[in-house]
């Protein structure tokens, strides 16, 4: 990929095109350039009427100006109506390591959209990698009983990384679930935590009981 800032003026013009696909592709291109000089052109797209364009604007801002992510994206959590854009906002804050966004993310553990909830769990895993607040742990423990398979598997994974090893029981239920999507998620989590388990004899035995 060519990262040449000389392309920015042309792409900035494309961001104002009447066709949303053109605006979306221009935002994607600016994301690849990763230039802070793109920020002023991308920020207005957070209010674009097309949600696909807003998604790409969020991703591009996170890539081009990581130092501005908290300032620009956290306020959008409260106003964004589209669940796909909300999920993208949440993920971008987590990927960007925006620890000051932790409190703002907590309400989205109860979002009506499962994608948003699952992404929030992952974001909190990144933002609270060590010594998570007990309130956050408790909130995520409640998600072990969520109806969505991805939410449950993400909750199991993050709790495991926080050394809440009792989640192995919930993992066993996921692996043996009658619904294939739940079993798929269970298999994914086993793969994610399998390397650590293999280095601990006691955990290996516990997992043997889960997968037996």
Image: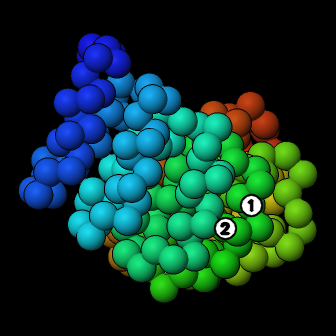
Q: Residue furthest left?
A: 19
Q: Nearer the viewer, residue 49 or 16?
A: 16
Q: Is residue 198 above or below residue 181?
A: above
- Please state the horizontal and vertical placement of residue 115, each as a whole percent of the image: 44, 69
- Please state the horizontal and vertical placement of residue 169, each as a whole percent of the image: 68, 68
Disc 2 element: helix
**Residue 145 visible in the shown view:** yes
Asked where in the image residue 9 lies, by quadrant, the reply is: top left
Q: Is residue 31 left or right of residue 104?
A: left
Disc 1 element: helix
Residue under circle 1?
A: 102
Q: Is residue 183 above or below residue 98?
A: below
Q: Is residue 52 left or right of residue 129?
A: left
Q: State the mark number for residue 15.
A: none
Q: Is residue 67 above or below residue 75?
A: above
**Residue 157 visible in the shown view:** no
Q: CA distance from mark 2 to mark 1?
A: 5 Å
Q: Nearer the viewer, residue 113 or 159?
A: 113
Q: Which quadrant holds the C terminus?
A: bottom right
Q: Which residue shows up at 37% across the image and 75% down it?
A: 82
- Please state the horizontal and vertical placement of residue 148, each as a whole percent of the image: 46, 77
Q: Nearer the viewer, residue 133 or 25?
A: 25
Q: Looking at the image, do the residues carrying marks 2 and 1 touch, with CB atoms under 8 Å apart?
A: yes
Q: Nearer the viewer, residue 187 or 202?
A: 187
Q: Which residue shows up at 64% across the image and 37% down it?
A: 67
Residue under circle 2?
A: 105
């Amino acid at each position: 990929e060519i990262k040449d800032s000389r392309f920015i003026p042309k792409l900035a013009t494309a961001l104002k095109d009447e066709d949303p696909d053109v605006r979306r592709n221009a935002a994607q291109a600016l994301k690849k350039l990763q230039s802070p000089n793109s920020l002023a052109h991308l920020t207005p797209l957070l209010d674009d009427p097309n949600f696909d364009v807003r998604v790409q604007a969020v991703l591009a801002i996170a890539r081009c100006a990581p130092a501005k992510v908290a300032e620009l994206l956290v306020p959008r959590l409260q106003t964004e109506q589209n669940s796909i854009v909300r999920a993208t906002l949440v993920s971008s804050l987590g990927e960007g390591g925006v620890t000051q966004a932790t409190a703002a993310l907590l309400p989205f553990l109860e979002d009506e959209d499962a994608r948003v909830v699952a992404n929030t769990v992952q974001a909190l895993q990144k933002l609270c990698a060590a010594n998570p607040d007990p309130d956050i742990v408790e909130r995520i423990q409640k998600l072990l009983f969520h109806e969505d398979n991805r939410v449950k598997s993400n909750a199991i994974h993050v709790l495991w990384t926080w050394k809440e090893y009792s989640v192995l029981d919930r993992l066993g239920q996921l692996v043996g679930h009658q619904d294939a999507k739940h079993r798929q998620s269970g298999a994914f989590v086993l793969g994610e935590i399998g390397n650590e388990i293999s280095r601990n004899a006691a955990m290996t035995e516990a997992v043997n009981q889960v997968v037996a």
